[in-house]
Image (spheres, helix red, strand yellow):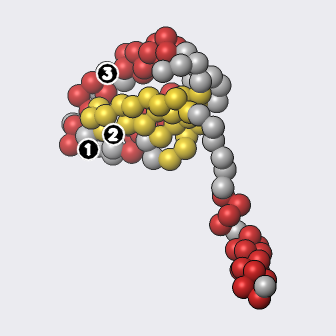
């Protein structure tokens, strides 16, 4: 890993979580609060992205703090992956009706030529 923004994705065992929580959503809520307080955005499900670049040492410290704060994690974590985020391109606009209609019109024009 290098100095870059980081993505963290993890999987937790539902069966293990049930030993610690009546509602397993509480575990994810606690982790989410921790991650947001520590400079991450919540991307999807168990996926987070750092707002700023981080080095390997910083991500290791963050992970250790997370583990110490939530001792139940040690028995629940199945996977905990950290990935360097490279170039990122937002293509959300390609899903809008206006963009799709514009593309259809361009294709029609090209077919006529």
Q: Which marked residue is nearer to the observer: mark 1 or mark 2?
A: 2
Of all residues, the one furthest to the front in this rendering is 113
Q: Secondary structure at mark 3?
A: loop
Q: CA distance from mark 1 to mark 3?
A: 16 Å
Q: Earlier in the sequence, mark 1 or mark 3?
A: 1
Instruction: Give the percent coordinates (x, y) of residue 69.
Output: 40, 19
Rendered image: mark on residue 71:
3
Q: CA distance from mark 1 to mark 2?
A: 9 Å
- At 23% from the left and 28% from the top, the residue drawn is 75
Give the quarter of the image for residue 53. Answer: top right
Q: Secondary structure at mark 1?
A: helix
Q: Residues within 10 Å of mark 3 (few under 14, many from 20)?
A: few
Q: Looking at the image, is 45 positioned above or below residue 69? A: below
- At 72% from the left and 79% from the top, the residue drawn is 107
Rendered image: mark on residue 14:
1
Instruction: Give the percent coordinates (x, y) of residue 22.
Output: 29, 43
For label 2, the residue is 11
């Amino acid at each position: 890993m290098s100095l870059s923004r980081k993505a963290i994705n993890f999987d937790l065992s539902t069966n293990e979580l049930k030993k610690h929580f009546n509602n397993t959503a509480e575990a994810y809520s606690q982790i989410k609060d921790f991650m947001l307080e520590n400079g991450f955005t919540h991307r999807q499900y168990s996926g987070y992205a750092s707002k700023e670049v981080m080095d390997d040492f910083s991500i290791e410290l963050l992970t250790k703090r997370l583990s110490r704060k939530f001792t139940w994690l040690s028995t629940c974590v199945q996977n905990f992956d950290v990935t360097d985020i490279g170039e990122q391109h937002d293509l959300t606009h390609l899903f809008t009706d206006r963009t799709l209609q514009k593309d259809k019109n361009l294709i029609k024009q090209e077919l006529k030529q």
